[in-house]
Amino acid sequence: MIKAGIIGATGYAGAELVRLLAGHKQVEVIWLGSKSYTGQTYTDIYQNMNEIVEGECQDDNIEKLAKQADVIFTATPQGFLASVLLKEHLEQAKFIDLSADYRLKDVKVYEKWYKIEHKSPQFLEEAVYGLCEINRSQVKGARLIANPGCYTTCSILTAYPLVKEGLIDPSTLIVDAKSGTSGAGRGAKADNLFCEVNENMKAYGVTTHRHTPEIEEQLGIAAGKEVRISFTPHLAPMNRGILVTEYASLVKKSDGSLPSEEEIRSVYERRYGKERFVRVLKPGVCPQTKWVEGSNFVDINFKVDERTGRVIMMGALDNLVKGAAGQAVQNMNLLFGFPEEEWLDYTPLFP
Amino acid sequence: MIKAGIIGATGYAGAELVRLLAGHKQVEVIWLGSKSYTGQTYTDIYQNMNEIVEGECQDDNIEKLAKQADVIFTATPQGFLASVLLKEHLEQAKFIDLSADYRLKDVKVYEKWYKIEHKSPQFLEEAVYGLCEINRSQVKGARLIANPGCYTTCSILTAYPLVKEGLIDPSTLIVDAKSGTSGAGRGAKADNLFCEVNENMKAYGVTTHRHTPEIEEQLGIAAGKEVRISFTPHLAPMNRGILVTEYASLVKKSDGSLPSEEEIRSVYERRYGKERFVRVLKPGVCPQTKWVEGSNFVDINFKVDERTGRVIMMGALDNLVKGAAGQAVQNMNLLFGFPEEEWLDYTPLFP
Amino acid sequence: MIKAGIIGATGYAGAELVRLLAGHKQVEVIWLGSKSYTGQTYTDIYQNMNEIVEGECQDDNIEKLAKQADVIFTATPQGFLASVLLKEHLEQAKFIDLSADYRLKDVKVYEKWYKIEHKSPQFLEEAVYGLCEINRSQVKGARLIANPGCYTTCSILTAYPLVKEGLIDPSTLIVDAKSGTSGAGRGAKADNLFCEVNENMKAYGVTTHRHTPEIEEQLGIAAGKEVRISFTPHLAPMNRGILVTEYASLVKKSDGSLPSEEEIRSVYERRYGKERFVRVLKPGVCPQTKWVEGSNFVDINFKVDERTGRVIMMGALDNLVKGAAGQAVQNMNLLFGFPEEEWLDYTPLFP
Amino acid sequence: MIKAGIIGATGYAGAELVRLLAGHKQVEVIWLGSKSYTGQTYTDIYQNMNEIVEGECQDDNIEKLAKQADVIFTATPQGFLASVLLKEHLEQAKFIDLSADYRLKDVKVYEKWYKIEHKSPQFLEEAVYGLCEINRSQVKGARLIANPGCYTTCSILTAYPLVKEGLIDPSTLIVDAKSGTSGAGRGAKADNLFCEVNENMKAYGVTTHRHTPEIEEQLGIAAGKEVRISFTPHLAPMNRGILVTEYASLVKKSDGSLPSEEEIRSVYERRYGKERFVRVLKPGVCPQTKWVEGSNFVDINFKVDERTGRVIMMGALDNLVKGAAGQAVQNMNLLFGFPEEEWLDYTPLFP
């Protein structure tokens, strides 16, 4: 039984962590941090957890928390952890940061896209990018995990095998992503009111969304060279779920022919065949966000378009689970030597 | 480890049973019955259960199934089980019927409201109405459980303590219920198309809905006299969830005063204080269907209206869980001596 | 061609007024008031009106506006108009107030339910309650119109004929109302975020909602005696639409029998047969909010429940049109002698 | 005053035509055709049009209808009009076909993508592709209009100016489209049930959607050469609206630089500056489907991505209006010499 603390427990990602950890038999949550609701009973804010979770919200106090906890989750705005994290904290507890502070290795890229100064770049090298299916072995021994973004988890896992094996030309990669509104957080903004989102679709952050360099860095590592992509997020009228549709030109084989549907499928299956949380769907079946809702699964499939020489890849996940809190728990399981799927094997809710 | 069969496993309630039983460590599902999809891989229909559930859909065969299974769930249209059930089946397996066939003790009432002939009224006396919080002890020893309806579970539990204790006049009871669309089932009807339900609210079955006599029978038992209510269901643009708002005149005390908020609250707390799946909310908090989604909880609260001498009671549940499959699993747990909440303690999903 | 000014043009009701008046050939809008967006281009906030509406948002200035406009609409918070309105303004322009300031004749009732002091009770007597179908003749000669609330318009029109003709006992009247979220306004509150409203139903303001006394006052006038009702509003996951379900005991006739379906229907048809904006549906058809969306219609129907001696009445309207801006335009048409349906005869949008 | 007949008046596109024509002062609808509902009162099916539209549904009879009507709209399945249209009908009435029968000039392409035989290819040459903003002059003199598809109208108009002026390389064009569910029609299929669509996003028809060759043909005419694109439609949980996000590589200028944001904007403005129904939004504003709902507008904008040398174009329309019935009315206005926007200038409904 380990002790966990959560800073930022009343945002949607933080609350999902509380929900998942409430069912985890190896973890006791000892700290429900929330600056906005300090002193209030946690379940007065999240009544879904009534009679399941106990305790009051506590103010930020990383000093105190680091001494008590085995693992600390930070579901906080960009810049928070970078501005408070010290070397001694890392010696006291493991950190899993759901913000972007330690995801990008190049501090200049971080500062350019996030438009804030990075206050502790000295930890960037040590931090492990916690995309379990790709970096499992590094995660196991880490002290500081940069939990990947929601769009990025979906975008990277969907294209990774084909980039890694050189079947697609990464310079042609276009990622068109559609997200439920919980990704926008629980902040009270007119743009996220029910009436503004319902019966509506729009793109946003076109050419400037901060998850772009994160996808580029990780796929660049896979490709062994710098990668630049077009990434366009869209807001969809649903609570949960991300669907990505990715387009790339297939690399012709030495005989001038395109890789076949079967060759591509075998690459996916080699990579993900044994992964508990990645499901490569049957040929012809398109992923649907509802099929993964409430679970830690990513559903993936693809279609070859011989007319254009492109492959269209599709991936779906629940942005609050595999895209945030679920992946954080998966990282925690790896860090502490629990089975990776421990208390994380929820069956998706449908309908 | 017991063996379970499901007849009607591809409707929404049946699929929810499959989902819940997939996580239940004491149960092996050996039969996925579906007349419409016989021979097809189950997860081709419910892709959410990919890599979790295995097997093909099988045609109805109660003879064969009763010999193999310890418990049989029937999530079938009204009249199905009544027309096939024989005495020997009840000696071979326990039955939990999610249809209305054995819910009403009076066969004439059944035939009047359902407009079909009852083919096996001889089992009506034996059948136990499986509302666990009310009939727990009878359930434990039963062979045939009539699993309550979704509206009825919510309507009865919300009013039960006050009817039982005589605090309200049941002849004044009005139940206004709002339901998500999964309650209408997976049949392809134009009325249930997305475009007809979305951005829309309507009442239906006004004065004629079949759950009316079921509520009346159970509350009549509580009141010790015949009860007649007004029950109006409404279709709401959401997948899951039932909310009931119930109105009744409070019975004046001998001194002519109305029962106070505190007196009423103490009646609820006495009745439900130890119930795992009924949550009486704090004063002033109105139940929300989202707070129980995906879980077996019923959330209940009330408000006294001194101006009119009425109490307004509110209850919320997930129609597919506590309103159908969850309650069926709860009944199964009671039947087989498992802890009542075994593998049924899902935390509601929010948002 | 008359000149109109709108104070509060960037709330949802105000924006709907702008939309409706943009199509009205007899009206020029000369003032788009908005304290929050003063100086900004109106269509930067409501891009749906791009290339249709021109001009910038202006700060409140009732002095200046009253001199320029023939009619002033105030779609403002409770208390605003009461605190600024002077006798001379009423001599300069007609006022149609979409707030509650002049709806209740008894200032004490206003102050009790709204919990604010009324700053200009001297105008209460003069103000006309602008429910056109009931008060048409008074509206025509008025200077100050109290435009009815959204819930109240629907609740009153649905029950009015039966109260007026004495067919129901108003002391038994219960109004259970379901509303789309635009009724909650455009203020940025966490409760109204997409993720909190979507896939969710709840009651709110139970026993305390401010539209209660307004319904009671108007139905009391119809009944010729004081009326007390139970009114419970609910928030539904849709943008527009109010559905009310109303329950009341039928008054027995002198021979002890209940009024028949046909007798009740003839009362509705006498009252509403010639009304352009009230549609009494065919027997057995339940009103749906989608059938009136975007229009000024109220759809009404009812069902007699002989088992309980009650009648269940149902009504549906679009809360932003007949429940707010559309009714305001209807009042304006009456005030200025335009045909009542002038530029207001939108066909509802379905699906 | 002209006489119009509609074959297929009870599908969603047909019903939208009825709605729009009900408000058109120059048109009398004399024929509400519906095979499925022959003999039934039209407003029993579409209650939104109660007290606005009169008449019963009539069976198909193109012979009889062509003799009575000035214009015939066919909102029918693919293949219907092609199989019944004769030369003499075209001499009796104008035809506006909302199906795909006469959209593609090459009968082989039609038969390949639609997988049905074309029964009257002799009319293909005469038929005019009714995309008014592009083919206005040809439309005016036509007898047979092929009304464009919903996805295609949006996809073509969004990219047209840049293809026409050679600013983008059409071989790199990728169209990622998101559509509301009314585009799937009113047929009762399990896939389109509320519970299957709500809270869900998916791609469908990947690489095989029939609107692909239509987009390719029209953009090919603009480019002056054959064009092949990737087109992926998605189903979104909303009733109305199509959003397209289009990606293409910019063609470098002779000095090796990319066209600037301003140069691209001026191309859009030259093309659409005077178009009543195309709105090019301000820089930085992304189109939203809700901003055009219920109207005949297409909202368009774009963003240059200097990092990748691509331009991201976005377009939004209401699939039932500009994507179907509205465009059909616009075509009718052109055919009969009415002002193009006649009774078609609805302000979009928001929220």
Image: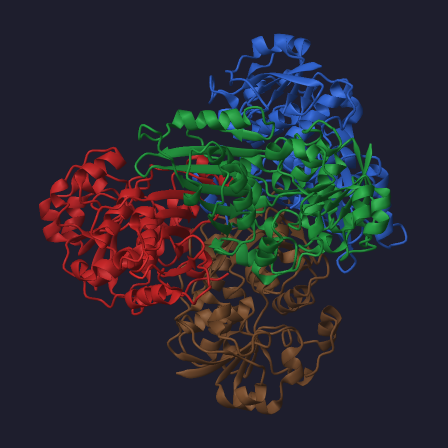
Chain colours: A blue, B green, C red, D brown
- The picture places residue C185, in percent across and down from the top left corner, at 37, 43
Task: Depth check: give the residue in front, A348 or A104.
Answer: A348
Task: Depth check: give the residue in front, B30 or D99.
Answer: B30
In the displayed structure, does residue C98 sit left or right of residue D50?
A: left
- In which quadrant of the rendered image does the N terminus of chain A lie? top right
Q: How many marks?
A: 0
- The picture places residue C263, in percent across and down from the top left corner, at 34, 66
Task: Depth check: give the residue in front, D59 or B88.
Answer: B88
Task: Depth check: give the residue in front, C283 or D83.
Answer: C283
- Above or below: residue A113 compared with residue C3: above
Any part of residue D315 in sight? yes
Q: Residue at x 57, y 88 (%)?
A: D90
Q: Residue furthest right?
A: A255
- Above or below: residue B315 compared with residue D62: above
Quarter of image, res D150: bottom right
In the displayed structure, does residue B253 sit left or right of residue D55?
A: left
- The picture places residue C327, in percent across and down from the top left corner, at 29, 57
Quarter of image, res A332: top right
- Above or below: residue B93 compared with residue A326: below
Any part of residue A173 in sight? no
- The picture places residue C209, in percent across and down from the top left corner, at 33, 39
Q: Residue at x 64, y 50 (%)?
A: B100
In the displayed structure, does residue D160 sit left or right of residue A226?
A: left
Q: Residue at x 68, y 52 (%)?
A: B121
